[in-house]
Amino acid sequence: MMSARAAAARAVAAVLAGRALDAAVDHARGRAAGAEGPLIQQLAYGAVRYWFRLEPLVAARLRRPLKRRDSDIHALLVIALYELLDMRTPDHAAVDAAVEATRALRKPWAGKLVNAVLRGVLRQREALAATEEPVHDHAWPQWLATMIAADWPADWPAIAASGTARAPMTLRVNTLRMARERYQERLAALGHEASAHPSVASALTLSRPLPVEALPGFAEGDVTVQDAAAQLAAPLLMPLSGLRALDACAAPGGKTGHLAELGPPAKLVALEQDADRAEDLRATCQRLAIAADIRVADASRPRDWWDGRAFDRILLDAPCSGTGVIRRHPDIRLLRRPSDLDALTVLQDRLLSALWSLLAPGGILLYATCSLLRRENAERIDRFLQRERDAEVIPIAADWGRTEGPGRQILPGEADMDGFFYACLRRH
Ligand SMILES: C[S@@+](CC[C@H](N)C(=O)[O-])C[C@H]1O[C@@H](n2cnc3c(N)ncnc32)[C@H](O)[C@@H]1O
């Protein structure tokens, strides 16, 4: 059985190779003793969250960079620094555990190196603490910090800080079945405190996170875990009842479920291009007992899947940089590359244009992203409006977010929400 440090190092090395952190941690937890699971998660998430602050301390103490095949050792060093500098694990315990983990990783040659690098940082700990700028400034890759700060200069310090803040666990009550207050009472009866979100009618924010199995009625579909900002999508498409609706980029089905709960629409088609993710969408629809027509298809190629009948409502929750949800997915900072933005904006334009032709006259398309970047948000819609003469913007008047060109933007952390952009378009 692998030690928690070694398992966490393997998970972080997998992220460095391009894997998503949640999947990498699940895999690592599966291979370690059950009791180690929470520690593996804490170490891996901590190392990834603070990678851009801690890794330079490692790099500065290596005579030459570690080889790609030794990225587990690289990760182990950052994990140990996270333990030493942020978790305040006693020095000898953290150093010994890291050296021990080199053996579990079958790289005993790295024991001396790990010991030397960590001791080197410890010798300079006080000097480091004195020169250190606020933690959050260091926890971003420079290119991404520059890009976001260019769009939001005045808000950048708050955005930067939100990236390392803990996100709350927010629930969406299935209001088709019960009032939000009733579910709040059910939680209270079990000793769980939750507060009603001031701007989002279905949202309850838990004071302390809980495993989903501890949520009453979760398996039966009474409640779904979903950030409050994401719960704003379906209401923007109301009324839905009796209409034909399309959720074009649907997995894992968070918003599909909400569309059904607020309708139900006469027909709800849920598309997802990725077959594995479509399985999660299926599971969500099953749990919520939703009759959605789920198809694994490319939304930008309607001739592959469309039956020719126009939709009254279309939700395009577009693939995007995820810059608004970094507090929940710290690995985005490691996984994203500057070149991704070009590919994403091309895809966003293609999806918008292809889906527009499926909308009935008078119908509404909601464009949504969990991005903060103007390139993926207002700029995409402005360009779209130049191309499509039969589109008009429905202004979103709300007590959340701020007007941002043709849409509305929430910055991460505002009212404890993820960063999101919404633009509502009606077809003449
Ligand atoms: C932002 S996520 C959707 C989240 C989802 N709406 C929810 O609330 O749970 C975007 C999804 O679009 C999918 N996707 C990307 N390109 C697509 C395409 N061309 N056609 C259909 N789905 C696509 C991705 O695999 C991903 O699952």
Image (cartoon, rainbow, N blue to C red):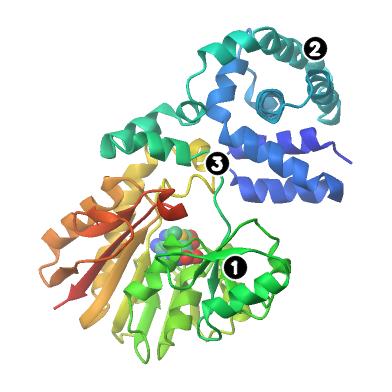
Q: CA distance from mark 2 to mark 3?
A: 29 Å
Tell me if label 2 and label 1 are in contact, CB under 8 Å: no
SS at mark 1 in the image: helix
Mark 1 lies on residue: 280
Q: Is mark 2 within 8 Å of ligand 1?
A: no
Choose the circle earlier in sequence order: 2 or 1: 2
What amino acid does circle 1 point to? Asp
* C-alpha gap between disc 2 and disc 1: 44 Å
Please tell me whether residue 4 is drawn above or below residue 177 in the rendered image.
above
Asked whether residue 30 appears in the rendered view, the answer is yes
Whichever of callouts 2 and 3 sits on the residue coming sooner in the sequence is 2
Q: Residues within 10 Å of mark 1 (few under 14, many from 20)?
A: some
Point 48% across, 31% down: residue: 136
Up the image or down, 320 lies above or below 256; here it is above
In front of the other: 349 or 305:
349
Residue 404's x, y, as percent?
23, 53
Instruction: Assign a secondary structure to mark 2.
Output: helix
Q: Which mark is residue 183?
A: none
What residue is shown at x 69% (from left), y 29% (from top)? Answer: 79
Measuring from the top left, give residue 394's x and y in whole percent: 19, 70
* 10 Å crowding of disc 2: few (<14), some (14-19), many (20+): few
Using a 10 Å C-alpha cutoff, classify the residue at mark 3 as few (fewer than 14 neighbours), some (14 to 19) or many (20 or more).
Answer: many
Q: Is 396 placed above or below 53 here?
A: below
Identify the mark nearer the N-term, 1 or 3.
Answer: 1
Which residue is denoted by mark 3 in the rendering? 331
Find disc 2 in the rendering and name its residue: 112
- Which amino acid type corresponds to the residue marked 3 in the rendered image? Asp
User: Which quarter is ligand 1 in?
Assistant: bottom left
Q: For the residue marked with disc 2, what is the amino acid? A: Lys
Q: Is 182 in front, or is 17?
A: 182
Note whether residue 417 is visible: no
Q: Are marks 1 and 3 in contact (CB under 8 Å)?
A: no
